[in-house]
Image (tube, rainbow, N blue to C red):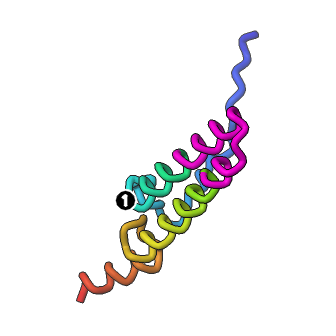
Amino acid sequence: MGQETHDTGTERAYLPVAAPPTNHGHTRAAWVTVTLVLLGGVISSLAFIVSQVWMFWAGMGVVVVGVIAGYVLKMLGFGQPTQRREKASEGAVDD
């Protein structure tokens, strides 16, 4: 009851090598992708409720267009930068 135990071990923190970008997807490419995929999902869901096969596939088409548009926008530079692009831009600043 009067004895106190002390932990003699050392505490270690395992941190990532580099911190990830802090914008967490707040980019034009992310917003376009999420908006179009959500819209396509809503269209497909409504089509399922009203039993319209053509409308379901139209909604799925909107989903595919949204994914492709997001990828193209990311390639055009409207997405979150990758590690390689960040390092290249940092090298240009240091020179």
Could you say where residue 80 lies in the image, as x and y percent from the top left?
A: 42, 65
Residue ID at (39%, 53%):
26
What secondary structure prevails in the magenta region? helix
Residue 85 placement: quadrant: bottom left
The question of residue 44 being in magenta is answered with: yes
- Residue in front for this viewpoint, 91 or 85: 85
Q: Quadrant of the N terminus?
A: top right
Which residue sits at x=41%, y=66%? 79
Question: Against 27, is 87 above or below?
Answer: below
The answer to which of 36 and 78 lies nearer the viewer is: 36
Amino acid beneath label 1:
Arg
Question: Where, quadrant-wise, is the C terminus in this rendering?
Answer: bottom left
Frontmost residue, 81 versus 34: 34
Give the image location of residue 48, x and y in percent: 71, 38
- In the rendered image, residue 67, in percent from the top left (x then y), is placed at 55, 62
Q: Is residue 40 left or right of residue 70?
A: right
Count numbered badges in the picture. 1
